[in-house]
Image (spheres, rainbow, N blue to C red):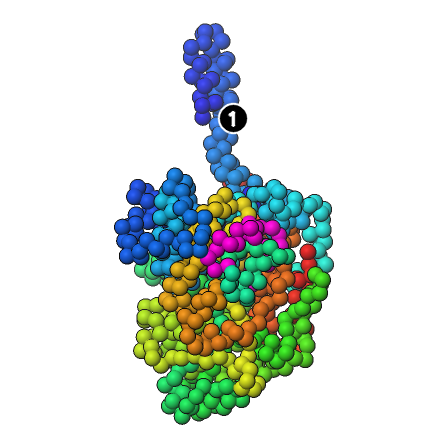
Amino acid sequence: MAAAGTPTLESPSRQRPTAGRRQSVASRVAKRGGPYLLILPSLAVIGVILAWPLYNLFVLAFQKFGLPQILHMSHPKAGKAPEWVGFANFSKAFHDPQFWSTLQRTAIFTAVNVAATLIIGTAIAVLMGRVAKSIRLMLTAVLIFVWATPQLVGLTIWNWLFDQEFGVVNYVLTKLHLGHFLHHSWYTQPWQGFMVVTFVVVWGAIPFIAITMHAALTQVPEELVEAARVDGASPLQVFRNVMLPILRPILVILTSLSIIWDFQVFTQVYILRDNRPEPWYFLISIFSFVTSFKAHDYGYGSALAIITLLIMAFVSIFYIRQLIRISEDQ
Amino acid sequence: MKARILAAVGLTAALAVAGCSSSKSNAGNTSGPTGSSTPATSASPSSGGSSGGSSGGGDASASGTLTVWLMTDAQNGWPKEVQAATDAFNKKYPNVKVDVQYQTWGDHLTKLDAALAATPPDVVELGNTETTKYMATGALADLTNDKSKFDTSDSWLKGLSDSVTYQGKVFGVPYYAGARGVIYRTDMFQAVGISAPPTTLDELKADGEKLKAKYGSNPNFSALYWPGKNWYGAMSFVYGYGGNIATGDGGKWTANLESPEAQAGLTELKSLVDDLSKAPKDGDESKQDSVMAQGNVAMIYGNGWEVGSVTAAKDKGGNPDLADKVAAFPLPGKDAAKPLPSFLGGSDLVIPAASEHVAWAEEWINDFTGKDGMTALVNDAKVIPNTTSLLSLLGDSPFAKAAQESWFVPTAPNWADVESQNVLQTMLANIMTGKQSIADATKAADQQINKILNGS
């Protein structure tokens, strides 16, 4: 701010003939530089917490980096200096069957979770538009409540609910005569385990989707919907042919955001599996974490993180393109 | 690269906030961190710690902070002894603040890695299966020449002193050990007419059947509650049947879980578990003491201190009503002469090579694990002491007996990675849930162990 302020402060004291011209130069600088100055603090923060670690992540991915290299950092005489290994960590990933099976698992998990979140979220949003105001308020309050629940707190509760020995879920299912669920372990079969994880992930993601979609739905002009109804369109046709095209931009954004979130799911699986997920519960994020922090292979772990990052960057293209389109339309 | 580690440190710091903030508020107190304890001299001046001829005296002018990482076992089980060590230390170094931070087993190595890259703590508790990797990489201070400073170093328990020795050098101080045994409900045994604890596996099975016959109508009842992933217990069967996890020869390691002996042990275990246990087949043993406290379990296979947690106060997850109804016996073997070997678990205290306070750290460790400290610890917490000279304090405890017949993990530098990647737990979950046959599961585990132990 000082830099922008200085010329404007100086200019009034200048001699008259040149003052006008100078001032316009100064104000032009202020006009152009001002916005950049204003985003400078956030850029600095992003630089510190995002760009710098990211840069180091890239460096690590091209190095052999383990416990000896860690020691070397604080104690140059101990351990070993990091060694540049080119693309060795990446080619290790591409030749690692565990990487491919984990990637496949993550992709399927993401697809199921994104679909479930969007469908249920949109359904709730539509519902919110139909019900009485008091019910809508109650729904919103509940959604916000879910949204505000810290992830770890929520997870601990879910973990108790699905506990094999003392879990309420097993108890209730058995009491309802839906099968013999006493002492049923939800994690022995991975598909059941992932069902629980999906349940928890979708539960946590729905509030944002539902509230955003509800806001988007209120933007659909009432007369369009009425016109369609008058022309004899069924509710489903109204939704598909009138509302959906208007909702498309926001849907693209929500879908790409959901893909990014669900592809990176970590905590839910990690906590539900008592901090020790079996290999068949590995998602790509967990695989990367375990490789780095449990097996001390920080180089390979970083390479895995970068592969994830590249996949996410690809998805975010759709998100950013949609954002640009929206701002152009406006 | 530093930043990535720093990010991890940041996380660590965030996780440790509770510990830090409480100690910081102490620091504001000008009377010193242990101000309250200085006048409380009921512990008599003789506990000054110099009994073993340690460097003596200390330094009243030295000031700074000694950071100590202990496991939550100490926080929950013997906080008094930790405080006593700090008090003894502060008599010699009144101006050195001792900051004890409690860690959990699940993530303490991750945090240690992060700390080693920046500012490591001065004293760290490591499990005796975790030390080798850090000794081999040179992360720990070499204490070979200072060994005599430690009170009981001439009689350290072999299972522990081996775990702090690498290529003839000493890198740590044994802290305490634990052996496992079968903890059982004496009242239930009496109710079905069993007068003496079983001494063979066949007797154990027969007793289990009797218990099942009487209490089996309760769907939650387990005669022997054995979570599938209890790998310490499972390996007792492997070693007891003549097998082992892996053997080393000149730096090359070979995993042996698919050997007929190891498979025979695991087969025996699986039939026992299938028969007598309702515990989660893919769960671990971390909750078994509180499950036993609920009253639906006749036997668990656990550590000596778990007797205490089963009968602890209600708000600590125990059940005081069971106080005089719980006892223990060694896990029986095939024949009465030889119980199955117990894993000799335990902890060591080490000093990171990068610590700036090695002398203080040695002093504090000696105050904590020297003769006085250890006597208090054994009397209070019933752990197995770090020295054979104090074993008699335990009397004829079944756990002390179990410790005499013990097995230990392979002393390969990369062994900690086998543990932290849960190779054996995964194998056991596969076996116990029936997802894989014993042959397939052990073969897969062997491949993974070979890869880890022989990797660079």
Taking the spot 46% from the left edge, 66% from the top edge, the residue there is B389
Residue at image position (72%, 54%) is: A91
- Residue B221, image x, y percentages: 43, 83
Q: Quadrant of residue A144?
A: bottom left
Q: Position of residue B286 (x, y in %)?
A: 46, 69
The image shows a total of numbered marks equal to 1
Q: Is residue A118 visible?
A: no
Q: Is residue B31 left or right of residue B217?
A: left
Q: Position of residue A164 (x, y in %)?
A: 46, 75
Q: Looking at the image, is B381 positioned above or below residue B93?
A: below
Q: Is residue B182 left or right of residue B83?
A: right
Identity of the amino acid at label 1?
Arg
Is B95 magenta? The answer is: no
The answer to whether residue A6 is seen in the rendering is yes
Instruction: Give the residue number, with chain letter if any, for mark 1.
Output: A32
Between residue B208 and residue B124, name the one nearer to us. B124
Callout 1: chain: A
Name which residue lies at 37% across and 59% down: B81
Where is the C terminus of chain B found, in terms of image quarters? bottom right
- Image height of A1 relative to A315, above or below: above
Quadrant in which the N terminus of chain B is drawn: top right
Specify the quadrant of the image occupied by residue A149: bottom left
Q: Which residues are magenta?
A: B129-153
Q: Secondary structure at mark 1?
A: helix
Residue in the picture at 44% in, 53% down? B53
Residue B84, percent from left and from top: 36, 56
| Left or right for B293, reference B350 | left
In magenta stretch: residue B130: yes
Closer-to-camera residue (A71/A43): A71
